[in-house]
Image (tube, rainbow, N blue to C red):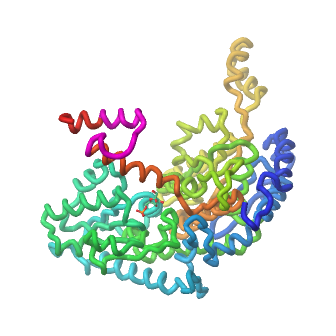
Amino acid sequence: MTKDSPTRLTERPEWQALKDHQKAMNKVHMKELFDQDSTRFERFFAKGAGLSLDYSKNRMVDETLDKLMALARSCQLPAKIDAMFRGERINVSEHRPALHVALRNSSDEGITVDGTDIMPEVRRTLARMEEFVWRILSNQWRGFANKPFTDVVSIGIGGSFLGPKLVSEALRPYWHGNLKCHYVANIDGTDISEVLRRINPETTLFLIQSKSFRTQETLENTEVARQWFLSNGGSQELISKHFVAVTANTAEAVEFGIAEENIFPMWDWVGGRYSLWSAIGLPTALTLGMDNFRALLAGAEAMDNHFRSTPLEDNLPVLTALLGVWYGNFWGADAHTILPYDHYMRGLPAHLQQVDMESNGKCVTQGGEPIDYETGPIIWGGAGANGQHAYHQLLHQGTKLSPADFIIPLRSHNPIADHHAILFANCLSQSQALMQGKTEEEARAELASQGLGADEINRLAPHKVIPGNKPSNTLLFERATPQAVGALVALYEHRTFVQGVIWDVDSFDQWGVELGKQLGKGILDRILEGETTGGSTDSSTAGLIRMFRSRHMPES
Ligand code: F6P
């Protein structure tokens, strides 16, 4: 609760109206809504930034939308959207703006932070990226044996990993071809070992990606990479040819041994999970070329413009966010499913897990008061059609409600045989099956048509009934181009923001993940130095530490 929203969310008339409306809608099956209205598809369809959204397969009527919009207005959504774009300190617990939109702003509009227009610095960094990418791709910048680079190893985790990896993979058809990009994120030694096994130090460039330059996994992996480089023909002087960093913490990167001229900036006003548009996107720019990276930014900017200027009723991030609120807060949905029917985009659920769950997995309001309603859902999913032969069963007949987003291009980059038509048919058959289900009557008729007797029909029919009425959206675009992928990722960023506004949480901090980091340090000390160090430990953690030490420090 903030001074702008004087009444608790759940006590507002708009919230109560939605609660009452849910009771009425509970008796309605979506199939009936489609039967009653042949124009439902046309009426619940919206477009923006090259994306199309069919949201007709939702448990809603016009009144539902009106009530959701009223809730959004009661939360001052339009003013809050404006505040984000203007650079207000909407990350209240860290007292920072959240200005990922500045990274894709190609207009003349200045954006001010602490009295300084940040746009010149954004443009300068893009120009530096452009030059760097050109020097690498044109073989002007070479490895120590004067050979062109063949491999880039990006070392980073969380937002310094998931976003660049997703967009690079999603845009596989746009790769330049010669430079292979590897990602190392995990502190599990397997991750970096497997990469080091495949590369040649003479022709490998290491990109150290860390906004804070304090992340244990990234620093440990960087140290391993440095030692490997030094013991495989490299030298201290050659580090500046092979190690480049992206960070907001230049001092610690320099102290670590990265040459200052090899450091690209990051800024406090960009959250890690929103940073793929900054120099953290260098692995993407190197893989796709700078023109395609700029096209990615342009796609995201088109979505920013759509989000900022389109009425709430036609606004893709707003519509999708409010439907998520509808299910999460009024229908008991704990999860939201992301189903990219595009093999190149199979990393989308993992990226959106961080974007959404790290942003809205919160339990106090912006004012610090405990929350008495549900906030961010569990985000999960995977590539279609593969999931149809696995977890879709739960979507169709399980007891959990997890509304789904089906995401599919109209054209494939690989149009072989009838594959894309079959993929498209699979996608539609899933959303249709989720919506209409199968009644007992239909199940019985089907079994009878197979020649089964009455006893067998009675036995099998309950298993064959599929409740249906399971909501989904379908998001379409022409082809998975850099623009489309940029717009899609930006859509989900803004969707997350809108939900954060409704729930009155700080979507841009992540204090929860800090506790593990804090405790991890003490536990590591105990593992390495024995149980006498550090404070008291619960018996479970102490017992597990003993087990580890008994294998690795048997003398202790
Ligand atoms: O631990 C979570 C987190 O702080 C994310 O928010 C961030 O994207 C990731 O760690 C990596 O942080 P950094 O870029 O500072 O290394």
Q: Nearer the viewer, residue 315 or 343?
A: 315
The answer, for residue 285, to whether it is visible in the render is no
Give left or right: position of 383 versus 7.
left
Residue 48 percent across, percent down from the top left: 67, 68
Q: Nearer the viewer, residue 447 or 102?
A: 102
Residue pictured at 68% horizontal, 19% vertical: 460
The answer, for residue 138, to whether it is visible in the render is yes
Q: Is residue 87 magenta?
A: no
Q: Quadrant of ligand 1?
A: bottom left
Residue pictured at 25% horizontal, 33% vertical: 550
Is residue 67 positioned above or below 435 on the image? below
Number of numbered discs on residues: 0
Is residue 515 positioned above or below 5 on the image? above
Q: Nearer the viewer, residue 346 or 305?
A: 305
**Quadrant of the rendering where the C terminus is positioned:** top left
Residue 407, image quadrant: bottom right
Residue pictured at 54% horizontal, 58% vertical: 355
Residue pictured at 71% horizontal, 52% vertical: 325
Residue 205 percent across, percent down from the top left: 27, 68
**Quadrant of the rendering where the N terminus is positioned:** bottom right
Is residue 427 positioned above or below 314 on the image? above
Q: Is residue 532 magenta?
A: yes
Residue 283 percent across, percent down from the top left: 38, 67
Q: Which residues are magenta?
A: 529-547
Residue 196 percent across, percent down from the top left: 24, 56
Give left or right: position of 536 versus 552.
right
